[in-house]
Amino acid sequence: MQLKNSTYKGIIPIGIFIGLLGIVRQDMISYMWGLFFWAMFWAGMADVEGLKISLLKRAIKGFKQGCFFTLIIVLIICGICIFTPFISIEEFIKGVIEPFYKYKKIDLPLPVNVYGIIFYLPILLAIISLIVLLYKNRKRIIRANTPIFWKEMLIINLTLNIFNYSLLGDSLSFLLPSILLSSLVLFNLVESDNEHL
């Protein structure tokens, strides 16, 4: 982030791979795009020591990074759809939209049994981890311009975004991604503060 073009160069391969993922797994592209878009936005918002950039300029910087990432994905998907026989744009759009009505939307379970508690556990852990992270930042245990802060923010962001996938079906396979990510959040909650000093 301290070099002018290094961030954008790093975004290009991520955009390419997410674009390729969208060709073979259209049902995941919206989730993966959301995960990385917000990760790049918040990374751009980081108050890097020595740059003296205002909050508004950092917000614009983060938004530009997310837009650049989106542009790479769109170019990859459109290029493959137009110039190869693998998939058409119509098939791609259908693959993105279809999961939202193909799978049965679940009725949100009440947290009165084991499944209900497990269902809400990822989002609960993410919220608690966010509160703890902001508290540590306020107490100067973790500074907002350090990699560890944005690593934790990224995991929280991933957990909250991928939780949407669990709303498509009532089987464990839909809930499993958010459970796995929330386990990383759990490690953030219990690790020693001395590691961040």
Image (cartoon, grey):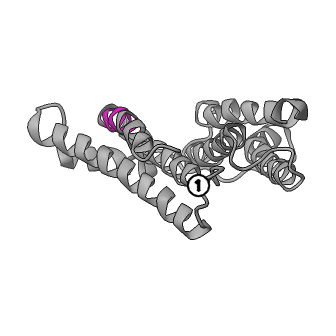
Question: What is the three-letter code of the residue carrying label 1?
Answer: Leu
Q: Residue placed farthest to the front in the image?
A: 50
Place of residue 170 in the rendered image (x, y in percent of width and height, measured from the top left): 62, 40
Classify the position of the C terminus by image quarter: top right
Q: Residue at x 71, y 37 (%)?
A: 148
The answer to whether residue 144 is above or below residue 182 is below
The magenta segment: 14-22
What residue is at 73 percent from the left and 47 percent from the top?
123
Residue pointed to by mark 1: 51
Q: Toward the viewer: 118 or 144?
A: 144
- Number of labels in the image equals 1
Q: Measuring 48% from the left and 50% from the top, which residue is drawn there?
A: 37
User: Does the segment drawn in magenta span residue 102?
Assistant: no
Q: Is most of the magenta stretch helix, strand or loop?
A: helix
Coordinates of residue 48 in the picture (x, y in percent): 62, 50
As drawn, 168 above or below 60 = above
Residue 123 showing in the rendered view: yes
- What is the quadrant of residue 113 in the picture? top right
Q: Evaluate whether residue 1 shows in this view.
A: no
Circle 1 SS class: loop
Callout 1 crowding tier (Cα within 10 Å): few <14, some 14–19, many ≥20:
few
Residue projecting furthest to the bottom: 56
Residue shown at 20% from the left, 45% from the top: 78
147 on left or right of 16: right
Residue 97, image x and y in percent? 36, 52
Please give left or right for residue 75 compared with residue 118 in the image. Answer: left
Q: Nearer the viewer, residue 9 or 134?
A: 9
Is residue 16 one of those drawn in magenta?
yes
Percent of width and height locating residue 92: 26, 44
